Image (tube, rainbow, N blue to C red):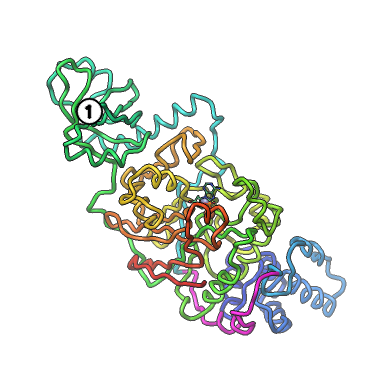
Amino acid sequence: MPLEASARIVSELTSRGYNAEREAVTKLASADDPHATLERVVEELPADALVVQTDHVEAVLSATEADAKPTAGGQQSPATTENEDPSVSTGDRTADPTAVGGAAPVETGGSAGANRSVDPELRSLEIAGDMTGDSTGTGEYEDFVAVFRDRLEKLGSKLRGRVNHRPATAIQKMPGGGEVGMVGLVNDIRSTASGHWLIELEDATGTFPWLVMKDREYADLVEELLCDEVLAMEGTLADDSGIAFVDSMYFPDVPRTHKPSTADRHVQAALISDVHVGSQEFMHDAWNAFADWLHTAEAQHVEYLLIAGDMVEGVGVYPNQDEELDVVDIYEQYEVFNEYLKQVPGDIEIVMIPGNHDAVRLAEPQPGFDENLREIMSAHDSRIVSNPSTVTLEGVSVLMYHGVSLDEVIAELPEEKASYDDPHKAMFHLLKKRHVAPQFGGHTRLAPEEEDYLVMEEVPDIFHTGHVHKLGFGKYHNVLAINSGCWQSQTDFQKSVNIDPDAGFAPIVDLDTLDVTVQKFS
Ligand code: D5M
Ligand code: FE
Ligand code: ZN
C-alpha cells in the first residue's frame, strides 16, 4: 500500500482535527475508495471522538461491503485488531481511566485540530548513528579494548593536528628536558602530597604520567576531568624522562567558529523526555493539556516531537519503586503510553530513544525498542532509534541522548560548573569532551561494541537530553543544549534527596533560528 496514500489520509484527517490509529490509516488507504470511505468514517464518528480508530473504519467498511456486493471476497476481518489494547478503554479521548479531562473540554480537540495546516512535503527527517540491530559486543575483554581504541582513534584525530604528539612508550625514551606532547585517554587522576595533580594518560602503546602544578592556569581544568575522556597535553619532560610538566591541555571540543544549520522555513520542534507513564506521579493532566495545546493554532508550527527516553516508569528500576507504580505490568505501561501518544496530532513526526526506565538493555548505547514494543507503540508512525542517535530535521541536527551520564558529571564536577539546577551546563562539558558518557564504571554502564557510538564525531546543532528531570537550556559555542524536564511530579526518592523536578514543561525550538520558548502545562 503506497505510503503516500497514508500520508494523504493522515493530513486529511488532521486538517479536520482528528488523529488516527495507524491501523485505521492502513485500512483507509487500502479501501476501494479511500476518499469516500474517509468521508463516511468522519460522518459516523461519535461527536466527542478525537481519534479515528480501527473499529470506526472497520464498521464503515463492512457496512459499505454489505450495501454493495456481499459477494466481495472477505478481505476484511473486523475482529482482528479490536482486542489489541485490552488495558485501555477505546472510544474515549483519554486512555487512562484516571485521566482527568476537566482542563480540556471535549469540543476543543475537534475544532482546535483544524488549526493545523501542514504540508508534509516540506519536511525532512534523517537519522544517523542509530545502532539498533548492529550490536555485536559480547561483553568480553577484547570488546572493551576495541571500544576504547575506537574512542581514542576518533577523538584523537581531532587533537593530533593541534599538538606535536608522541606515543607513550616513545616519550619514555626521549632525552629529558625537551618539549613533548601526547594524545590519550585519562587513565587516572590523583592529587600529590604537595597539592599538585598527577594525570596518567594512556594510548595504544602504554601510559605516561603528566603533572599539573597547582599554581598553573590549567590546575582549574583538572576538576573538570573525567576518567576515560580523551585529551591532549603538551609540556616539558623531567630530566629523567619519567614524567612531564603540563604547559597546555587541549580538549576535542566544539570549535568556537561552529555555525549551526537552520531550517529554511518557520517550523518548530517540541523537545521532551521522561514521561514516566505508569508511575503514580505521572502528570496526566499536564500531558493532556500539552496534547490539547498541540492541536491549537498557537502550536501549528510544531511539526516534530522528540522524546529523549523514559517513556514509561518501568518496573524494578530502583529499590522500592513498585510502591509508587500505577500500572505494574511493563507492557501495559507501554500500552497506556501509546494511548497518550494518540492524543498528539497525527501529522506530527515523532522520534523516540529509550532511557534507563525503558524495557531495553540498560548499558549504553541502548538499542531502540524491540519489535514487540514497537508494535505496542504504533499509534503514531514514530521513529524509534537508539540512545544516543542523531536526527536531522530540515538540516538541523539534533543529538538525542537520554542523559544518565549527567548524574556523573554533576557528581564529579564542582557545583558552579555542573549542577541539577543548570543541567545544560553539565551538557556543555559533554560537548567539550565530544562524548555523551565519557566515564566508565560509575552510574553509566557501557556495552562495549566494536565502535564507540557514544563519541560525538560531528558537532550537533542541538544537543537534547533528559534524565535529571530539570529544565535548562543554553548555548555552548553556538550549539544549543537543552535538557527537557519531565512529566512526573516529585517521587519519594527525589524528595529524600531534594530533587525538585521541573515537571509539565515543553521546550519548543524554532528550527529556523534555534530560539527556545518554554510552554508550561502544570
Ligand atoms: O532519574 C531522575 C533523576 O533522579 C536522575 O537524576 C537520577 C535520580 N534518581 C531517581 N531515583 C533514583 C534512585 N533510586 N537512586 C539514584 N538516583 C535516582 P530517572 O532515570 O527518571 O529515575
Ligand atoms: Fe526519568
Ligand atoms: Zn532517566
> Can the viewer see residue 391 in this picture?
yes
Q: Label 1 neighbourhood size at 10 Å, few (<14), some (14-19), many (20+)?
A: few
Q: Is residue 519 left or right of residue 66?
A: left
Does 49 appear above or below 74? below
Secondary structure under badge 1? loop
Q: Residue at x 35, y 29 (%)?
A: 187
Q: Is residue 478 left or right of residue 70?
A: left
Q: Is residue 236 left or right of residue 411?
A: left
Picture mark count: 1
- Percent of width and height locating residue 257: 22, 53
- Percent of width and height locating residue 132: 55, 44
Q: From this viewpoint, which residue is outermost toward the right?
A: 71
Q: Residue at x 62, y 84 (%)?
A: 107
Q: Quadrant of the N terminus?
A: bottom right
Q: Is residue 434 found inside the magenta-colored segment of the image? A: no
Q: Residue under label 1, please give it.
A: 194
For the residue pair 403 and 18, the one nearer the viewer reads as 403
Residue range highlighted in magenta: 98-121
Does 195 appear above or below 24? above
